[in-house]
Amino acid sequence: MIEFCQNIKSKFQKAFFLLFYKSSFSAFGLRSTLLFPFKVNGAKYIRIGKKVHINEQAWLLSQQIDEQDPKIEIGDYTYIGRNAHIVSVRDVKIGNSVLIADKVYISDNLHDYQDIKVPIKSQAVVFKKSVYIGDHSWLGENVCVIGASVGKHSIVGANSVVTSDIPDYSIAVGTPAKVIKQYNHQTNKWERI
């Protein structure tokens, strides 16, 4: 009975979303879902591919801080877990078939902190670096990616903080995240480095 009620609720929410919110986005692909409750700021700068699933409590924020338009792009078949927080002031791109666990934070920016006479919360938001999450990658629970990219078919372990680029076919863990394994295409095995 519980599953039946949840299915009815989910279908109602999808219909409501399509009717009232879908047209606000730059693009919103076929059979994609953004579950209630959610928060979206700057929807006109957000492109979502087909068959994307974004779980409840997501916050997608695409905020303009200068003359350049910000953008968030989420590729086809990507799954984003609960309580995701994705922030762009310039460029955040998530590839196709990416798996993002619960409570993941992805951002291309941070608060300035240089002026010690001004509270950090009152200082400007500054662009750090474009973020790209490669196709087929997996970000574990509580991962933070700040101004860095994660390569194709790479894994970032739970609770890791990514502040520098992770190459393709790598496994990275820790704070800051460091590569501990890479896929060797000659031996067809994941190998410690």
Image (spheres, rainbow, N blue to C red):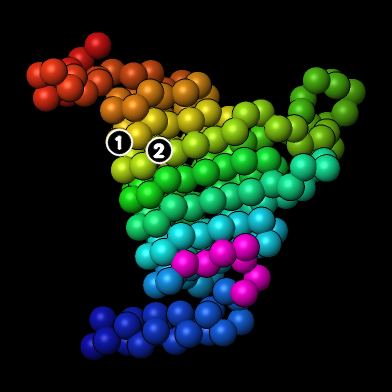
Q: Is 24 in the magenta?
A: yes
Residue 110, picture quadrant? top right
Residue under the image location 32 percent in, 83 percent down: 7
Image quadrant holding the C terminus, namely top left
Amino acid type for the residue under numbered disc 2: Gly
Residue 119 shown left or right of residue 43 in the figure? right
Which is nearer the eye, 106 or 45? 45
Q: Is residue 83 magenta?
A: no
Q: Quadrant of the N terminus?
A: bottom left
Q: Position of residue 176 (x, y in %)?
A: 46, 21
Q: Residues within 10 Å of mark 2 (few under 14, many from 20)?
A: many
Residue occupying image coordinates x 47% and y 45%: 94
The residue carrying pointer 1 sits among few (fewer than 14), some (14 to 19) or many (20 or more) residues within 10 Å by Cα, namely: some
The amino acid pointed to by label 1 is: His
CA gap, disc 1 to disc 2? 7 Å
Query: Which residue in the rendered view is the most extreme toward the top?
Result: 193
Asked if residue 156 shows in the view, the reply is no
Callout 2 secondary element? loop
From the viewer's side, name the closer residue of 50 and 149. 50
* Residue 76 as seen in the image, left or right of residue 192: right
Q: Is residue 30 above or below residue 119?
A: below
Q: Furthest-left residue in view?
A: 187
User: Is there a contact, CB below 8 Å, between mark 1 and mark 2?
Assistant: yes
Q: Which residues are magenta?
A: 23-29
Quick check: 164 left or right of 62?
A: left
Kind of element beneath mark 1: loop
